[in-house]
């Protein structure tokens, strides 16, 4: 069973077609890059997959559940981190972890254990009782990602997770993503940064609501005769 | 249920870590009660009055003497004819005129009924009511004194005329008004701001992606404010009673139950506002302009509803605050029970259900 399967998934807002019959599959443990210019329909597609938005037509299954009829099941099985911070700045690191664990229905013992492991992994034991607002940006993002997969979802959706941070921090963030993927977590990530696109197993590029290209970064570059993903993207976005 | 407690605890962290929120929650009620309490003070000292004594007998003289014995009233002038009353008022020095009709003493003992007329300048409705109440109390004392221990059923009737503003009925007593305002402020404004804040910061998205059902999100946000509003209601009541001597003649339990009802109404409004706005600023402005202003102006808190133009009177009927103030006043001042205030309570309940159902439905629509 593939973690994400869509068929002609479409969302219309009035006469505007935000997402036009997109069809794709994402494999288990894959890092799937979802690229596109602003307004290309990325966010709409992602919101439909997360059960936040009801599709106009087409089908989609996430973690084996239908997004129309089993949105609750979908939500239980996915993690989500948005471009804006998912953490409460006026809560302590520990309190944030406890809150998210709690709303996903984890038991207290479980949360405690996971909190310890998580803080140790991020090397943030000393900051456990600090307010999130006091942390540097890169740490917040790593923490947000760790919190998003606290309840061991089979898929995690990342909506432009690395906006506004320097390349070194971005690289560190991607180490976390790789690690999760190695454990079998499927990663669905939207991004603006083309260097990040290179890190993905496969990449889809959306233009005007449609998926115009979908393959591994290497194949895409070969297909478009391009040096880098940047070139591929520009060729597609400009329209030939 | 566990999810709910986790959520509510988070909400309390937000509240107790934000100084501005704390200030609005706990500083404002106290300051408001004190400001309103002392600004609209009931103390009257040496108010100038005019006296028209047409009886000029022993009893009327003693009545006048009684009136001026305390430090409440001071006779500015003695009038000779009823026609001069109007002129005296126009001069603006006197606040009240006492008219004792001819044969006052005789009527009292023979007809067992005597008349005294009090005319007050109700251009300032508060002072007018207070003056009249003082004068009535003094006349009542005098009557008992005349009756003596035998308690003969002899009465002095005071007839009151409020000059310039006959519709004095809803002159406010500030405690019910302030209580209404604060509950509305805390419940409606604070909840709409706190929900808007989650949207502004982007955390709402995370909550919506989580398996938390929407009604649990709303409840988790709202219940802490219900608790705090209730505490506020208690504080205001206590201050009203102990600092300003506000009576609570009716059942305190009923009073508090009505407070909870009004808190729910306000919360419904707050959630409704938060469904149409994504910014804390907008939520605040919407609560201020859309709720607080109309409430202050139209609920009868400051301006008597009866003296408004008809369209505004009609409009005031859709203010939940108007009905709540009536309920509060009836319970506190008249000692009414549920048997008397059920129509207003029913109306308020209806509004509450309407707002809450509407807001939860709107909240759901926002998700798709």
Image (cartoon, coloured by chain):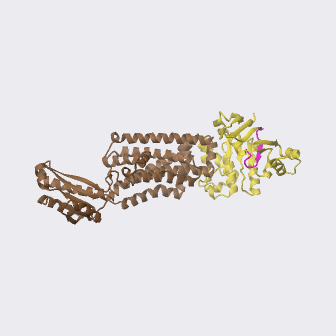
Was residue B65 drawn as part of the magenta stretch in this picture? no
* Colour of chain A in the image: yellow
Reply yes or no: does residue A30 show up in magenta.
yes
Left or right: residue B180 versus residue B192 is left
What is the quadrant of residue A73 in the picture? top right
Q: Is residue B137 above or below residue A112?
A: below
Seen as rendered, the residue at the extreme front is: B83
Answer above or below: position of A15 versus B228.
Answer: above
User: Observer-nearest residue: B281 or A81?
Assistant: B281
Q: Is residue A112 visible?
A: no
Q: Residue B212: x and y, percent? A: 59, 41
Residue stretch in magenta: A23-40
Q: Quadrant of residue A71?
A: top right
Give me the residue at 37% from left, 59% from top: B37
Q: Is residue B293 left or right of residue A71?
A: left
Q: Position of residue A230 (x, y in %)?
A: 82, 51
Placement of the C terminus of chain B among the 4 image quadrants = top right
Residue B1: x, y in percent?
A: 54, 40
> Which residue is nearer to you in this view: A190 or A120?
A190
Q: From this viewpoint, is residue B209 visible?
A: yes
Question: Along the line of sight, which residue is nearer the eye, B116 or A174?
Answer: B116
| Number of marks present in the image shown | 0
Q: Position of residue B174 (x, y in %)?
A: 37, 55
- Chain painted in brown in the figure: B
């Amino acid at each position: 069973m593939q973690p994400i399967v869509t068929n002609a998934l479409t969302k219309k807002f009035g006469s505007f077609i935000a997402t036009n019959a997109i069809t794709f599959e994402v494999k288990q443990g894959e890092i799937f890059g979802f690229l596109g210019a602003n307004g290309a329909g990325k966010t709409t597609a992602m919101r439909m997959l997360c059960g936040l938005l009801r599709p106009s037509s087409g089908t989609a299954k996430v973690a084996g559940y239908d997004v129309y009829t089993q949105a609750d099941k979908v939500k239980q099985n996915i993690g989500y981190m948005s471009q804006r911070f998912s953490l409460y700045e006026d809560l302590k690191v520990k309190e944030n972890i406890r809150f998210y664990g709690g709303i996903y229905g984890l038991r207290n013992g479980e949360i405690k254990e996971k909190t310890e492991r998580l803080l140790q992994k991020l090397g943030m034991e000393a900051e456990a009782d600090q307010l999130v607002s006091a942390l540097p940006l890169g740490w917040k993002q790593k923490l947000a990602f760790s919190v998003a997969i606290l309840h061991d979802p089979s898929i995690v959706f990342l909506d432009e997770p690395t906006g506004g941070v320097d390349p070194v921090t971005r690289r560190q963030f991607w180490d976390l993503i790789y690690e999760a993927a190695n454990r079998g977590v499927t990663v669905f990530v939207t991004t603006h940064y083309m260097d990040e696109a290179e890190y993905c197993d496969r990449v889809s590029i959306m233009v005007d609501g449609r998926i115009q290209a979908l393959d591994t970064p290497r194949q895409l570059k070969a297909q478009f005769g391009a040096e880098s993903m940047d070139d591929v993207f520009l060729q597609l976005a400009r329209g030939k | 249920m566990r999810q709910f407690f986790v959520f509510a605890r988070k909400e309390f962290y937000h509240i107790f870590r934000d100084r501005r929120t704390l200030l609005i929650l706990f500083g404002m009620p106290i300051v408001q009660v004190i400001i309103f309490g002392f600004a609209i003070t009931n103390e009257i000292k040496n108010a100038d009055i005019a006296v028209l004594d047409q009886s000029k007998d022993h009893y009327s003289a003693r009545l006048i003497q009684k009136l001026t014995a305390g430090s409440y009233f001071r006779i500015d002038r003695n009038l000779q004819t009823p026609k001069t009353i109007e002129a005296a008022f126009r001069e603006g020095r006197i606040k009240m005129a006492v008219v004792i009709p001819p044969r006052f003493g005789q009527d009292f003992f023979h007809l067992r009924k005597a008349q005294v007329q009090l005319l007050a300048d109700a251009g300032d409705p508060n002072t007018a009511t207070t003056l009249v109440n003082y004068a009535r109390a003094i006349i009542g004392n005098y009557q008992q004194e005349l009756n003596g221990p035998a308690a003969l059923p002899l009465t002095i009737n005071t007839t009151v005329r409020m000059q310039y503003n006959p519709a004095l009925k809803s002159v406010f007593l500030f405690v019910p008004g302030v209580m209404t305002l604060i509950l509305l402020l805390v419940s409606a404004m604070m909840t709409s701001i706190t929900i808007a804040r989650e949207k502004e910061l982007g955390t709402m998205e995370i909550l919506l992606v989580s398996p938390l059902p929407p009604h649990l999100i709303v409840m988790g946000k709202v219940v802490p404010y219900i608790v705090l509003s209730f505490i506020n209601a208690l504080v205001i009541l206590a201050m009203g009673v102990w600092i300003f001597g506000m009576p609570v003649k009716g059942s305190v339990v009923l009073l508090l139950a009505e407070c909870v009802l009004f808190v729910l109404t306000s919360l419904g409004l707050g959630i409704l506002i938060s469904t149409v706005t994504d910014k804390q600023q907008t939520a605040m402005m919407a609560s201020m302009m859309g709720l607080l202003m109309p409430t202050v102006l139209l609920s009868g808190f400051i301006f008597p509803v009866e003296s408004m133009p008809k369209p505004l009177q009609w409009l005031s009927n859709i203010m939940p605050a108007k009905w709540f103030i009536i309920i509060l006043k009836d319970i506190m001042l008249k000692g009414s029970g549920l048997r008397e205030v059920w129509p207003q309570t029913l109306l308020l309940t209806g509004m509450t259900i309407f707002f809450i159902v509407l807001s939860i439905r709107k909240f759901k629509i926002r998700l798709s």
